[in-house]
Amino acid sequence: MNLLNLEFFFILCGLLLAGLAVRIALDPVHPKRWGSALFWALLAVVFAGGKSLPTVVVGYGVLVMVVLAALRQVEPPHFALRDQAGLDASASRLGNLLLGPVLLVPAVAVVGGWLLGEIHWGSVNLVEGRSVSQIALGLGCVLAVGWALRVTRERPITVVDEGGRLLQLVSWTLILPPMLAALGGIFAKAGVGEVIAQGVAAALPVQSPLVAVVAYCAGMALFTILLGNAFAAFPIITLGVGLPFIVKAHGGDPAIMGALGMLSGYCGTLVTPMAANFNLVPVRLLELKDDHAVIKAQAPFAAAIWIFNVVVMYLCVYRFGR
Amino acid sequence: MIKLLGILLVAVGFAFRVNTLLVVLVGGVATGLIAGFSFNELMAMIGQFFVEQRSLTLPVILMVPVIGLLEKHGLQEHVASLMRRTRAATAGRVAWIYQVLRGLTSMVGINLGNHASMVRPLVVPMAEGASPPAAGEAGDPARAAIRAHAAAAENVGNFFSDDIIVAVGALLLIKGFFETAGVEVAMRDLKLWGVPTALWVIVVGGWRYRRLDARLAAMKPKDGA
């Protein structure tokens, strides 16, 4: 038995989202009042009640959220600009007190990640073992909200207003990461990966050791770009291209191939909109205008790192190991 | 081959900048229908995967109230004023140091933060404090460049130094996969062969963030002009 599990934090999120939905519904000047309120209310229900609702109901709820977003019914209101002089004055008055709650979050996440899993009374655990790091992060955030309320002397309802303000900036991008996970799941069930791996192997002259390395690393990057997830690409491309051609045909070392192959996949992650939580959510969170600003900044990184991986793999995979 | 229609739809949708959520939904439903699932089965599948993966958004939803409260009381202004006192700091150096720090900590399996908990409240105000963009719309290009690179520092630091010392995610997956495929690999070798790339990304970061500083310097209006 666990005293604290991830569901507790999902319910907290649900409460915050529900509060946001109510605030929007009560705001007569919100440009997309009812569409936005419905979107956040549905998300609140899915978050808090996801485990107990029938999956098909959640699915249709998600469908409605997607349609609302596609019809541009989920938009942030025009937030009034803040008074800069007041912000500066408050910054110099509160000073480093403002940093405390921000730094508390990683501190609790790290220390909690080590310790929380160890605490138990007989068969009663404090936290659920497999999600200990996420629970520690959640706990850090909850404590930090309490501390931030003390430092700023705000009323608790401000949590909904200020948190909601940022959530509305992130907007529907927030549900992209789980949506993409669902897409990846459907692709896997439909057997899309096998078709691609066969295509790569059939189209390229993988008889040459160099071409095999390039095809494997390119396959990892491209498939990661398509799926948005290197972990999903790895088994498919390694089974379809890596093992038969690099390891079996040319006697390459699987450990070197696997380590550098996964890192080549990450280069794909850097440049794909399918990796929404890394590349699209930050665009909204940092209030950037260009949806692809983060991807554009990362493209030179991806190219330089990918080429390096190919060179190191080619120079080492047939020479070292085993 | 027809199974790839879903991927094609997604690619075309992205190319024409159709709403990303809609593209993903249509791509998934098309692929599923072709594979012989009914619409209701697909909705149930989407619901199930969505609920299982809710935790992906947990760090953002739980963190935004903290940031929002503190920003209302001048968090960004305070961090920026700290950086203005540090003369050697530039936006590029701040991003580079964060990337290295993020990499070193993720090497031992520590997750220092993410875009919500570190980049928006700390890294961006530090970088913008070190290389202040012009006020108002004139500073927009500089601000966008700084923020995009701060986000990049988080991602690059996070990805390429994965579990080199303490194996957690990726390496366990690789080892597990090879075991199922009947190939023997040692965890020690997997860790060792991640090191060259982990060092290389520090060099690449040095290059990119130096370019960022050069671009920011070029954007700045000359003194007295």
Image (tube, rainbow, N blue to C red):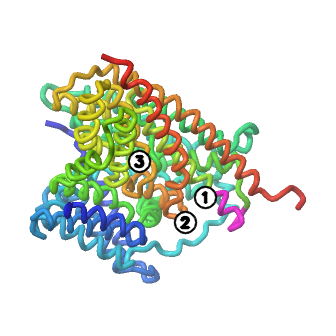
Above or below, B33 relative to A195 = below
Residue B141: say if magenta.
yes
Q: Residue at x 34, y 45 (%)?
A: A219
Element under label 1?
Answer: helix
Q: Residue at x 58, y 53 (%)?
A: B147
Number of disc labels: 3
Residue B214: say if magenta.
no
Above or below, B136 relative to A100 = below
Main secondary structure of the magenta stretch: helix
Element under label 3?
Answer: helix
Mark 3 on the same chain as mark 2: yes
Label 1–label 2 contact, CB within 8 A: yes
Mark 3 on the same chain as mark 1: no
> Residue type at mark 2?
Lys
Q: Which mark is residue B144?
A: 1
- Quarter-of-image position of residue A130: top left
Above or below, A193 relative to A289 = above
Q: Which mark is residue A268?
A: 3
Q: Residue at x 35, y 26 (%)?
A: A256
Q: Position of residue A81 (x, y in %)?
A: 60, 69
In space, the residues marked 1 and 2 are separated at their CA atoms by 8 Å
Element under label 2?
Answer: loop
Disc 2 designates what residue? A289
Q: Which residues are magenta?
A: B135-143
In space, the residues marked 3 and 1 are separated at their CA atoms by 23 Å
Q: Position of residue A21 (x, y in %)?
A: 34, 70
